[in-house]
Amino acid sequence: MGLAVVSAMVPSSAAIAADTADVRSSLRGLGLVPAPLFPTTVPPRLRASDAQLRGTERFTVTWDRGTEDGLPIGFVSFGRGKASQLRSDLATARARGSHPRRVRIGSRRVWRLCGHLCGFEWHEQSYTYFSLGIYYKNDAGGDLVARDERTLLASLAPLVGS
């Protein structure tokens, strides 16, 4: 997840969509095997947000909450990257003095990692899946963004069908 740089996770080729339904449709249309995990529920704070898909097999979806008074409100990203990404991010977090910990979200045991941003990572389907984000406004402790990430992860299911 690179905790500091989301764009490094995905190939430079980008497919862009305007909302969650478009992203879901675009990912389904790629015919990826295994079918990627994708949230079935989007938290209320993200429902009106623009959603952007970058990548294909390894992808990142970012829900951007926009701006207020010319300043960014924040974002949440979810996606899957190389299988080795988790090991690399754990090592980086520990080298920076952070203490990653295992937590349970639904039926999954995932790592809670903090670097420049905080988020969750785990292995599934031979990939590293991740969610990370930051809300710049009214979330100094990161509790709201973590709650929204947890909501996304608790609702994950393989994206199959049409």
Image (spheres, rainbow, N blue to C red):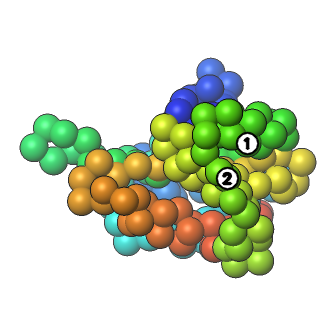
Q: Residue at x 47, y 49 (%)?
A: 133
Residue 126 image offset from top left, x and y in percent: 89, 48
Q: Earlier in the sequence, mark 1 or mark 2?
A: 1
Foreground residue, 24 or 124? 124
Please name the amino acid that badge 2 sits on.
Pro
Q: Residue at x 69, y 59 (%)?
A: 101
* Residue labelled with disc 1: 90
- The residue lying furthest to the front in this view is 97
The vertical placement of 106 against 98, above or below, is below
Instruction: Name the secondary structure under disc 1.
Output: helix
* Residue labelled with disc 2: 100
Foreground residue, 61 or 162? 61
Labels 1 & 2 near each other (Cβ < 8 A): yes
Residue 56 seen in the current view: no
Please name the amino acid that badge 1 sits on.
Leu
Say whether residue 23 is left or right of residue 43.
right
Q: Residue at x 40, y 58 (%)?
A: 142
- The residue lying furthest to the top in this view is 12
* Label 1 – label 2 distance at C-alpha: 7 Å
Say whether residue 58 is left or right of residue 71.
right
How many badges with numbers are in the image? Answer: 2
